[in-house]
Amino acid sequence: MGAEPVAILDIDGRPVPLRLRRNCRARRILLRLDKQGDGVVVTLPKWVPEVEGIAWAEKQVAWIANRLSALPTRTPFSDGAVIPFEGEDHVIRHIPSARRGVWREAGEIRVSGQPEHLARRVRDWLKKEARARLSEQTALASERLGLQHGRITVRDTRSRWGSCASNGNLSFCWRLILAPAFVLDYVVAHEVAHLKEPHHGASFWKTVAELDSSVDVGRKWLRQHGETLHFIG
């Protein structure tokens, strides 16, 4: 079973792709929304036929509809859309004749060029801004610990906001630039602390607190609002 949907469910008039996956350790049929919130995934034990999994999912339309309705509203990168930048709302404003690329001014993210390139240009600009801010904070935090960090990678990750490899390389989600600055600072402190403490014990959290005095605030914000960042753009 691959990524292609095996069926399309009709959820209140909305077509929702259904995908199947096998898990030899599963003891029962499981249903969840996919990571993008665009469809549903049914996990099947090895002994359950695919047709049975599809039939079971078709009986769960009320649950699926309820979960879909609870998802944050998607905000595309388009002219007039309002998106956060470091926690502050900005209006995307398309100014095709400006010939300035993308820049931030007066509460707006202004974008020149052709309309078909607007979304890509906004995304590329946000990634660039995220890399600059993450690199700056990582350098400061590493210097405070007297340690040298490795390569910094910025991706569009969903399962983790940041990670630290055993060789000192760090990876972050570019969407942190959308959150308030104290959230990005917390994630950087968390990953840089792993350069010294490769675990989540008491000494690790003490190191994080030495790097960032608002640890609890940053963690709480991500728990409460982090998922909404994945529905922007």
Image: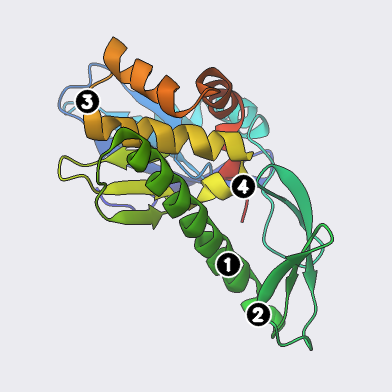
User: Mark 1 — residue?
Assistant: 125
Circle 4 sits in a helix, a strand or a loop, which is it? helix
User: Mark 2 — residue?
Assistant: 101
User: Mark 4 — residue?
Assistant: 178
Compared with 21, 48 (above or below) is above
Image point 38% across, 43% down: which residue? 19
Q: Amino acid at mark 2?
A: Gly
Task: Judge from the rendering whether residue 148 lies leftward or rightward of residue 63; answer left or right.
Answer: left
Task: Judge from the rendering whether residue 87 lies leftward or rightward of residue 19; answer left or right.
Answer: right
User: Which of the two discs, 1 and 2, labels the residue nearer the N terminus?
Assistant: 2
Pointer 1 with pointer 3, Cβ within 8 A? no
Question: Which of the two residues, 44 or 92, is positioned nearer the viewer here?
Answer: 92
Q: CA distance from mark 3 to mark 2?
A: 51 Å
Looking at the picture, how far across and down is residue 188, in whole percent?
42, 38
User: Which of the two discs, 3 and 2, labels the residue nearer the N terminus?
Assistant: 3
Q: CA distance from mark 4 to mark 2?
A: 19 Å
Q: Amino acid at mark 3?
A: Pro
Compared with 165, 152 (above or below) is below
Count every numbered label the image shows and give the total: 4
Mark 1 crowdedness (10 Å alpha carbons): few <14, some 14-19, many ≥20: some
The tag on residue 45 is: 3
Pointer 1 with pointer 2, Cβ within 8 A? yes
Q: CA distance from mark 4 to mark 1?
A: 12 Å
Mark 3 crowdedness (10 Å alpha carbons): few <14, some 14-19, many ≥20: some
Is residue 6 something that shows in the picture? no
> Which quadrant of the figure has residue 61?
top right
Q: CA distance from mark 3 to mark 4?
A: 39 Å
Question: Which of the two residues, 31 or 87, is positioned nearer the viewer here?
Answer: 87
